[in-house]
Image: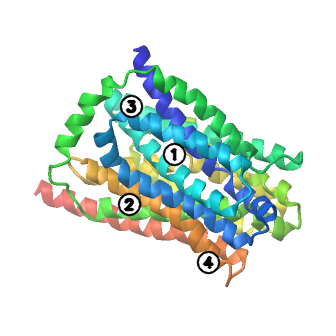
Amino acid sequence: MINKLSLTLISFLANFIMAGFASQFGMLIEPIAQSFSADVDNVAFIFSLLNGGALLGTILAFFLIDIIGIKRITLLNYSIIIICSFILYLTKSLIILKFCMILVGLCGGIGLCIAGTIVVSTWQDKMQSTILVVQDATFNIAGVIFPLITTYALTHDLSWATSYLTVGIVTVLMLVIILFTNFNLISKPYADQKQQSHQKSEWNFGILSAGFGLFLAMLALYTFLTWAPLFVSYKFSISFENAGNIITQYWGAALIGAFVSTAIVTRIKIEYFFVTIIILAFIMTLLIVNIQHIDYIGYFTYGYGFVCAALYNAFVAYGVTFVKNASSKNVSYILISGSAGAMFSPAISSVLSKYFSIQIIMNAIPVFYVIIIIMLAISMIEKKKTSSIDKI
């Protein structure tokens, strides 16, 4: 049992560390640009390197975990992250910064797959679903802690990379846990999963729309996380440091929402839960981007963070309801779609920022949710038709 808990702690830390690098990047765009005398748009694009590396890592993990072995790849993975976090703190070169971001993203993506493999192989049934949602909570905890560290660093004339150095220190502690943990517990389940991967996967509009929907949801979320501080700063003429509080507000609400979501999902069908949070996400983002008074934006940001707390894993849980026997390929497709959305969001928005105002870019966020809602309606109608035919 102790070994199970140790493995689970590693899976939580994998999410915590990835969030440590990804959660506060919107707060760092301007400080990095000033530190390296670079253009804001070019710095925003660096976030795509982080998410692009994560996408590549997600794809490579399915091969590397089996080839290298899960414990060895976990040790190697987080050793690289430690080195990169210290280099980020010390470097004065924008090229080295970009290279480290790619490596961190790559290792972070592999780490998320390692975390998923650990949970699926170690726990079963309702406990498995619960721990997956708690993983979202772990991600959100980091989303609260590291933006606070960044805010403190920026307001006390410390290095912009102070929070990244902190992530590196946490990773050192994780490495110690990995060294003393027995990974044999998950070797056999993973081998069984590998054999099942050769089975034919079922595909339909529902599972495909879940993947594309997660792509759009991550596109919306990371557009918000990247540009919200600048949006608030420009629109209400306040300092960038104070505007950065909007990111802390989002992650603070997401942390509470993750725990509430855990309780809700155990009591109602995933379909009802999922549709509700998507509709609420649309309403909250519509209010945020069109707000005219700064006193209210915090409330809507809290609401957005609260409803999106378990969005990532909710897409996975919802998508697999459209197939009788969900395969690893079905789940991988949804996860890769989410990583792609996170990767392309800063790249697309940074390009669009050269031609459109930040207000227009932010207005695209609720539009993404409208498209998701339309796809949800179509997929649910198709599911009902299929169920009716099967009964006949």
Disc 1: which residue: 310
Disc 3: which residue: 71
In the picture as drawn, the residue positioned furthest to the bottom comes out as 355
Picture quarter with the C terminus? bottom left
Could you tell me residue 261's position as x and y percent?
52, 40
Q: CA distance from mark 2 to mark 1?
A: 16 Å
How packed is label 1: few (under 14 Cα within 10 Å), some, or many (20 or more)? many
Disc 4: which residue: 351
Q: CA distance from mark 2 to mark 3?
A: 29 Å
- Which residue is at the front of the view, 189 or 208? 189
Labelled disc at residue 326: none
| Residue at (64% x, 50% y) in the render | 23
Say if mark 2 contacts mark 3, CB within 8 Å.
Answer: no
- Which residue is at the front of the view, 155 or 317? 155
Which element is circle 1 on?
Answer: loop
Asked whether residue 136 appears in the rendered view, the answer is no
Could you tell me residue 117's position as x and y percent?
36, 37
Could you tell me residue 257's position as x and y percent?
59, 41
Which element is circle 4 on?
Answer: helix
Going from the N terminus, do you reach mark 3 or mark 4 first?
3
* Tag in front: 3 or 1: 3
Going from the N terminus, do you reach mark 4 or mark 1 first?
1
